[in-house]
Image: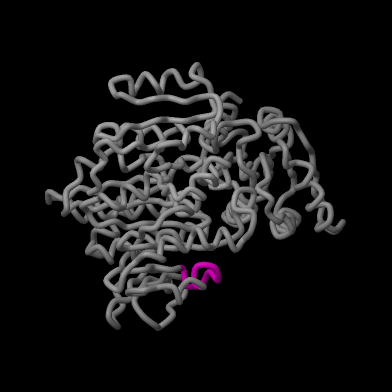
Amino acid sequence: MADWTGRRVAVIGFARQGKALARYLAEHGARVVVNDKRSAEKLALSMQDLADLPIEYVLGSHPPELIEDIDMLCLSGGVSVDLPLAIEARRQGIPLSNDSQIFLEACPAPIVGITGSAGKSTTTSLTGRMATKGFEGTRRHVWVGGNIGNPLIRDLDEMKSDDLVVMELSSFQLEIMSASPEVAAVLNITPNHLDRHKTMAAYLAAKAHILEFQTSEDTAVLGREDSGAWGFRNRVRGRLLSFGRQNSGKGDGAFIRDDGLYLSQQGKEIIVCPLQKIELRGSHNMLNVTAACVLAAVVGVSPEAIQAGIEGFTGLPHRLEFVRRLRGAEWYDDSIATTPERAIAGMQSFGESLILLAGGRDKDLPWDDCAAMICERVKHLILFGEAAQKIAKAVSSQCCSDRPLSVSIYLGLDEAVEAAVRVAEPGDVVLLAPGGTSFDQFADFEERGERFKSLVEAL
């Protein structure tokens, strides 16, 4: 574990990750300066939470003098490596880090790290649930967090060597990391966050860091039916396992056959769970469950405990979450769908007639495939937010007159929900699957999803 005593560390970004990291570093003897472009007034509550610690604050801008006489610059997930301050730090040879890197370097327990363009949170939560079932009756504790919501560095001092950590890692976190978990999973890779990473090559390079620093003693788990994830197989330094719908017949992993979920281990096929026990909707969620099975098995969880973890797991909020049935129509919240690919997966999860609410802020991603799916599956498309016109243009270029599709555009989510009420009929599914981020109107996808649910519940 690093000795932080007397080291001067600047933490950029004072949201959840930055706040947890600032506390950890200050409690371990570092001289911490927190920097955020927001004002002291807006950050007053967070600053009050750390009032017991000798932390310096530089707020309202990112002044160049901030990096004078510092030993390390730590970037929170929302802070780009292209920030001029970060560029200058690299030029001066000042190391960059973040809460995830520091956690990986200091954690005494084995770590399962999970990344991908979609399904990270569901797979992380389910893997943690399976492991918790497997460790019942022992003194082992399962810690679940990372990008999923709980900055694990907050709990680091309580962790023991025989515990287990299940950690979601985003491309933003991985981008500057030079450490990898002992067990690393790449679920899938599709275009995402190109507004931040600019190119697909840069996005792939960030994701690859979850494998890049493993050793021959470590394990990688890849989605073998996803070309992006499977394209990383030549980067694997240790043991390679995989998962998919079909049994590849090569190597250990998990697959689906007939009505069951199976593990393949050392040439033997072991049934884990009947598919009817899985309560999650959609084929993409079936793959998430399959991935979690492999990861749980790697860390020694029995097939019985894996099934126990699957049973009763209905998913996370804002991920194809059923909200209510109203006058014969069912309403679902899939606010997590912040890319066109995620919106496609949401639409494919239903056989009913669809009313789709889409929009938000675009990530500079292609919409052609999503537009084609909308033309095939949706009867009423209700668009809102900054990306509305871009989506409408993509849909108009894909649709033909053979199948009727109404398209309407509204300023925000509230008006979009009001419009959906007017057109919803018995047997319809009203689906919020935006395909864009929430940042044009909300702080994050969770706030957007909560607003959607409150609007629907009030109808």
- Residue sitting at x 80%, y 44%: 406
How many marks are shown on the rendered structure?
0
- Residue toward you, 351 or 373: 373
- Residue toward you, 351 or 207: 207
Compared with 194, 52 (above or below) is: above
> Residue 90, image x and y in percent?
49, 49
Quadrant (top left, top right, bottom left, bottom right) of the C terminus: top right
Left or right of 306 on screen, residue 62:
right
Tell whether position 75 is magenta: no
Q: Quadrant of residue 387?
A: top right
- Residue toward you, 311 or 249: 249
- Residue sitting at x 37%, y 42%: 71
> Residue 151, image x and y in percent?
36, 40
Q: Is residue 343 visible?
A: no
- Residue toward you, 288 or 375: 288
> Residue 347, image x and y in percent?
62, 53
Compared with 39, 124 (above or below) is: below
Left or right of 142 on screen, residue 456:
right
**Magenta span covers which residues?**
223-230
Compared with 108, 247 (above or below) is: below
Left or right of 188 on screen, residue 145:
left
- Residue sitting at x 42%, y 54%: 177
Q: Residue furthest left?
A: 138
Left or right of 189 on screen, residue 28:
left
Q: Is residue 367 visible?
A: yes
> Residue 209, image x and y in percent?
44, 61
- Residue sitting at x 62%, y 34%: 327
